[in-house]
Image: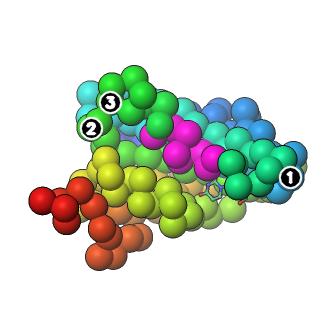
Amino acid sequence: MEKRAGDSALIREAIQARENAYTPYSHFRVGAALRTAEGKVYRGCNIENAGYTPSNCAERTAIFKAVSEGERNFDTIAIVAGKEGEELVPPTPCGVCRQVMMEFCDPETFRILLATSPEEYEVWTLAKILPLGFGPKDLL
Ligand code: THU
């Protein structure tokens, strides 16, 4: 999928979001910035837990923040990740986050920016990273 004006600004928001990552266990810090169809941006970071399983990924934090504010229509998510104190690495959303995206996003049009800087990123669609995804339409 093509790059667009505004992608770099969204990646910068994801980099800012990563500043709040709470990662005392993995020290792997992730930031996400989710843009709605109307252009509003919701940020998210990963939030870990001493019980491990309650940990939440950056992507889901951003999506749940937005949905809890009444948003359902999403255009693009930017994601950045890397070990504490190290360079950013190419991120890849976990399977649970892909499934949560499937609930709220059109797999053919939802844009996923996997970034290592505001200028260096790849644009994927949800359909590409979650082929044959099971979503709300499959229950109709
Ligand atoms: N994590 C995310 O927040 N997003 C991803 O795309 C991959 C993994 C988090 C979960 C956990 O806090 C840490 O990264 C290591 O798995």
- Residue at 56% over, 64% down: 94
Residue 27 in magenta stretch:
no
Side of 121 where 21 appears, left or right? right
Q: Amino acid at mark 2?
A: Asn
Disc 1 C-beta below 8 A from ligand 1? yes
Residue 124 picture location, percent across and down: 39, 63
Q: Which residue is mark 3?
A: 71
Tell whether label 3 touches label 2 (CB within 8 Å). Answer: yes
Chain-order first, disc 3 or disc 1: 1
Q: Is residue 73 left or right of residue 6?
A: left
Disc number for residue 25 = 1
**Secondary structure of the magenta portion, mostly?**
helix
In front of the other: label 1 or label 2? 1
Identify which residue, 51 or 16, lies in the foreground.
Answer: 51
Question: Could you give the CA–CA distance between mark 2 and mark 3, rounded to whole angstroms?
Answer: 6 Å
Say whether marks 1 and 2 touch (CB < 8 Å): no
Q: Residue at x 61, y 49 (%)?
A: 57
Query: How far apart are the two marked residues, 3 and 1, measured between alpha carbons?
Result: 31 Å
- Alpha carbons under labels 1 and 2: distance apart: 33 Å
* Residue range of the region highlighted in magenta in the rendering: 56-63
Q: Which of marks 2 and 1 precedes in the sequence? A: 1
Contact, mark 3 vs mark 1 (Cβ under 8 Å): no
Label 3, residues with CA under 10 Å away: few <14, some 14-19, many ≥20? some
In terms of image quadrants, where is residue 43? top right
Where is residue 62? Give x, y as percent.
51, 38
Please name the residue shown 39% across and 23% down the image.
69
Q: Secondary structure at mark 2?
A: loop
The location of residue 67, given as percent across then percent down, is 39, 33
Direction from residue 72 to residue 55 in the image, left or right = right
User: In x, y percent, where is residue 40?
Assistant: 37, 26
Q: Is residue 98 visible?
A: yes
